[in-house]
Image: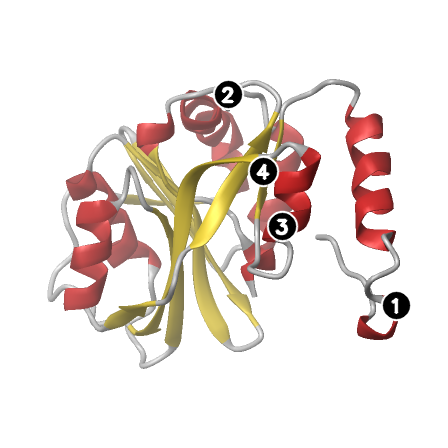
Amino acid sequence: MLLVARRCGGRGLGYRLMEEALGAADCATVFLYATAAGLPLYQKLGFRIVDEIAKHTGVFTPASAPAPGIRIGDTGDLPELVRLDRQAFGADRTMLLRRLLPMADRVVIADEGYALAWRNLGTVQVGPLVANSTSTATALLDAALPEENSTTRVDVCARAGADLSGWLTERGLTAQPPSPLMVYGECLPGNRAMLLAPFTQALG
């Protein structure tokens, strides 16, 4: 997250902070989800838009019966989650997943996908959601989300998740205006078609 106090705006602090962060990245590929306020700064620094992320919120209506082939996971499933996660992200995110798992209210796993559901300020959020197809993703969401009338949030990648977005709308969620996914450096690694809903707590 990049935050500058409103009273300190217009002094170039955001630009200097980003320059420092990019220098610390040491030529690694860097990506972020841009707000409307931050977009001009990131473009000036050389970031380019490669996708969009649309936040979907509302009260989710689950299926009447769970789909077969989905199971509840726990911290003992970390190696399997790392395997699936690496396919989508193209990187070993073991350290991040090890920290996310204890936060999750529910971990659900399929043969070719997984999802984490966790609570954030009264909202049940799903992410990451990694799946090899929309049907796998919808089955994971049905299993991951609670049955009670809770406010739900799923942030969907536009390119990979167009069908998923429509399904979420049918289940009671409303899509918000998308935020750009921006990259600095080389293209993002991994199979982006499998990454349907990233972990995007900072989208607001």
One can see residue 139 in this view: no
Q: Which residue is mark 4?
A: 97
Residue nearest the observer in this picture, 118 or 173: 173
> Which one is closest to the eye, mark 4 or mark 3?
3
Q: Is residue 110 left or right of residue 77?
A: left
Q: Earlier in the sequence, mark 4 or mark 3?
A: 3
User: Which residue is identified by label 2?
Assistant: 187
Looking at the rendering, which quadrant does residue 186 occupy? top right
Q: Nearer the viewer, mark 2 or mark 3?
A: 3
Mark closest to the chain's N terminus, 2 or 3: 3
Residues under labels 4 and 1: Cα distance?
A: 35 Å
Q: Which residue position is annotated with label 3?
A: 40
SS of the residue at dot 3? helix
The x, y position of residue 67, in whole percent, is 14, 49
As drawn, the label of residue 8 is: 1
**At which x and y percent is residue 114?**
36, 39
Q: Is residue 109 visible?
A: yes
